[in-house]
Amino acid sequence: MMRFIPVREAILGSVTLILIILVASRFAGFVAPSNLANVFNDTAPLIILALGQMVVILTRCIDLSVAANLALTGMAAAMINVAMPGLPIPVIIAIAVLMGGIMGAINGVLVWKLSIPPIVVTLGTMTIFRGIIFLISDGKWVNSHEMSAAFTGFPRAVLLGLPVLSWVAIMTVIVFGIVMSRTQFGRSIFAVGGNPHAAVYTGINVGKTQFWAFVVSGALAGLTGYLWVARYAVAYVDIAGGFELEVVAACVIGGISIAGGIGSVGGAVLGAIFLGVVKNALPVVNISPFWQLAISGSAILIAVAFNARSGRTKGRIILKSAEATQ
Amino acid sequence: MTDTTTTRYIPDRLNSRAVRILKSWEALLLALAIAIFVVNSFASPYFLNAWNLSDATFNFTEKAMIAFAMALLIISGEIDLSVASIIALASTAMGLAMQHGAGTSELVMIGLTVGLLCGAFNGVFVTILGLPSIVVTIGTMSLFRGISYIILGDGSFSGYPSSFSWFGQGYIYWVFTVEMLLFVMIAAIYVVLLHKTNFGRAIYAIGNNPTGALFSGIRVQRVKFILFLLTGLMSGVAAVCLTSRLGSTRPSIATGMELEVVTMVVLGGVNILGGSGTIPGVVIAAFVMGLVTFGLGLLNVPGIVMSIFIGLLLIGVIALPRLWAMAAARRKA
């Protein structure tokens, strides 16, 4: 199985590279280091969320509530900042991560203890979280002039040539790279998704692992919530509306199998970067941004059709041919 | 005896408790619907008014049309999250045709055809390429609405012929709308299709055990393909009704409706994992959701807060019976 993963990543990486070269042939400024850094910074929230989503999808679940979670924690962080402008940023980040984690834990408990299908749970919590934003904010916006300078400045502060937002994404990638390959938790995530029954016999608690996957995804959504609101310096009910689909798309494009157990950190990151490059390249080559939605939809379909060929087991193939000869 | 053992791992064996819960699910829902009706009529003096109640049916008729087909699809073990985007694309196609001078009958034909084509598109990916329906329809959800955005951008189509407004705004008799008639007719067709035909039995068989169904001579992929076609067609019907009722098309039309349709189906007692569920259950669920949103609307609750209730309803209706069963099992042990 390990043989396929690098191949898939190499193909996705080359497709992204070809895309960048094509854009650069029409508009050389696109490959200027400062612009590429901008594209990466723009994609950073997607990378962070895609890694959380990857963990959830690997355990055979899906988290559609990430964007709503992000919006709710973002709004809460903004409102806390307005109410207590003196509160240091690390405390706000800790609150955001904790809040996001708790919301993820709610998803996780429902999946673990009540065995409700994850798609139902997170479709439900998605609307509930969005509704709660309206309740706590009364439908009002929190604008930049109400936020403190430290609050909005943190993700934009430049460190070694890159904004903090980019560094957070890079750190997340490194941490996940280690956790997924070098820790018991990371390996049990793969085990649970690869074969839940076998995982039970090796002493892994499947439900509990799925619970923690949701907590991780939620905590990352909470972290991104603060970063998002601080970066764009505005919080309202509909921020990041529909972003959960982009996150799932990044994972699917990155070769994370929706059936669980197959995928890699590199794949999820490349999937996110691919979508980020497409998004930033469209205006450069004079294509209306309204094409973005259709392009990411097509990318999902192509990626999933492409990935499915290598993921099919022999038993399935026998059945398929039996069916074809009917 | 089997109740206390881990029946989770033998899904093809139903114990008597599960059968009993399933049997009483529709009754429970009906009681809930009546309770909501009574509470609402006390909560607002405007509730018990024939014209208001008639208006309230628009809250669910279009969604319910899709929900019937979706119920069949979910019973067979698949799902279609692209239904709201099919509405957007079908509505956009009707708008384009209208600008080129299409009359009412052509508009309806185009709406239904686009719906069918979208359903066929999903069906090809799921049944011929063998891809998981949840990913495929998340993809087409972006693709179909994306095409609407490419065509319309931030613009809109309006100025549909006045005879076209009959579908969404017309009345058959007194307070009974055209959409209500469609709703009743489609519900009847689906009751017969699911509960009285071989095709319906095949859907249950596939949902419970696709491999077993295949070896008992059911053309599993063909049945699933037809179900995707039906879901697309019903989305086309809903697109005609919604476009006719609103009198305009925007690419953001029916955003998030797939969630409400799935909620309606699950609330109606259809097992989200496939294999069980009934059309009468979905019909009652449609009334429950219509009554809840209408009642909250009369109490001036904003739409986004209503969605909290819908979300809680979706999780609650699945969680409560499970909590109940767990408590009962614990009492026995």
Image (tube, rainbow, N blue to C red):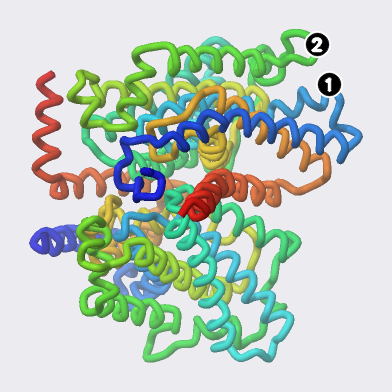
Camera-nearest residue between B281 and A182: B281
Asked if the residue at tag 2 contacts the one at tag 1, i.e. Cβ–Cβ closer than 8 Å, the answer is yes
Check the residue under mark 1 and report the chain it is in: B
Observer able to see residue A255: no
Can you identify the residue that label 1 sits on?
B50
Crowdedness of circle 2 by 10 Å Cα count: few (<14), some, many (20+)?
Answer: few
Q: Residue at x 23, y 71 (%)?
A: A187
Horizontal placement of B3 versus B300: left or right?
A: left
Quadrant position of the C terminus of chain A in the picture: top left
Dot 1: what SS?
helix
Under mark 1, the amino acid is Ala
Can you identify the residue that label 2 sits on?
B174
In the rendered structure, which disc, 1 or 2, sits on the residue that comes first in sequence?
Answer: 1
Check the residue under mark 2 and report the chain it is in: B
Residue B47, quarter of the rendered image: top right
Relative to B208, is A151 above or below?
below
Quadrant position of the N terminus of chain A in the picture: bottom left
Q: Position of residue B115 (x, y in %)?
A: 44, 24
Q: Position of residue B148 (x, y in %)?
A: 48, 37
Q: Residue at x 32, y 20 (%)?
A: B202
Under mark 2, the amino acid is Trp
Q: Position of residue B281 (x, y in %)?
A: 56, 27
Q: Residue at x 44, y 34 (%)?
A: B16
Dot 2: what SS?
loop
